[in-house]
Amino acid sequence: MLDGIDVFRITGARMRHLAERQNILAQNIANADTPLYRARDVKPFQFNSALLRSQPGAPALQLASTRPGHMGRAREGVAVTADRAEGYSEDPDGNTVNLEEQMVKQADVAKAYDLATLVYRRGTALLRTAAGGR
């Protein structure tokens, strides 16, 4: 029902992205002692992909690229990548997980998720007020 309203659709996409990132970070922490395990992370959330994702029956929106530096349309879904290509903090056993770094990233995810839930709750409160409820 609320997916037809952009703020709920975008906030929901952001929350799904953050949940997937939290899952990947948890896997990194769980494999901190696994030899040859490479730390992974999720590509940053693309606001334009959540905003421009077409709804059933609605025309698809496109970004206009008027200059070479403009972003193009992002793909659907979450892309998981290697956390660090250089592996500058690789352990002797080949593991690239840095526990302190993973914990900081998890705290960032928790903070961003709290903000997204606040936006969602405020949006529902606004709808309730508009409908005449408390």
Image (spheres, grey):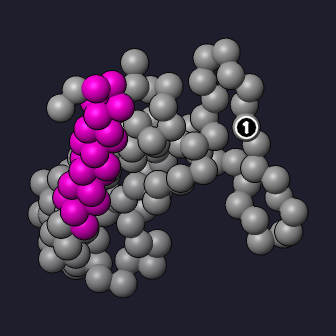
The answer to whether 79 is drawn above or below residue 77 in the figure is below
Q: Quadrant of residue 82?
A: bottom left
Residue 77 visible to the viewer: no
The secondary structure type at the circle numbered 1 is loop
Judging depth in this view, the residue of 50 and 129 nearest the camera is 129
Residue under pointer 1: 61
Percent across and percent down for residue 89 are: 29, 82
Q: Is the magenta stretch mostly helix, strand or loop?
A: helix
Q: Is residue 74 above or below residue 3?
A: below
- The C terminus is located in which quarter? top left
Is 16 in front, or is 134? Answer: 134
The number of callouts visible is 1
Q: From the top left corner, tell me how far across and down residue 104 is, in percent.
A: 20, 73
Residue drawn at the location 71% of the way across and 61% of the way down = 71
Q: Give the range drawn in magenta.
A: 108-132
Magenta region includes residue 111: yes
Residue situated in front as seen by the camera: 41 or 131: 131
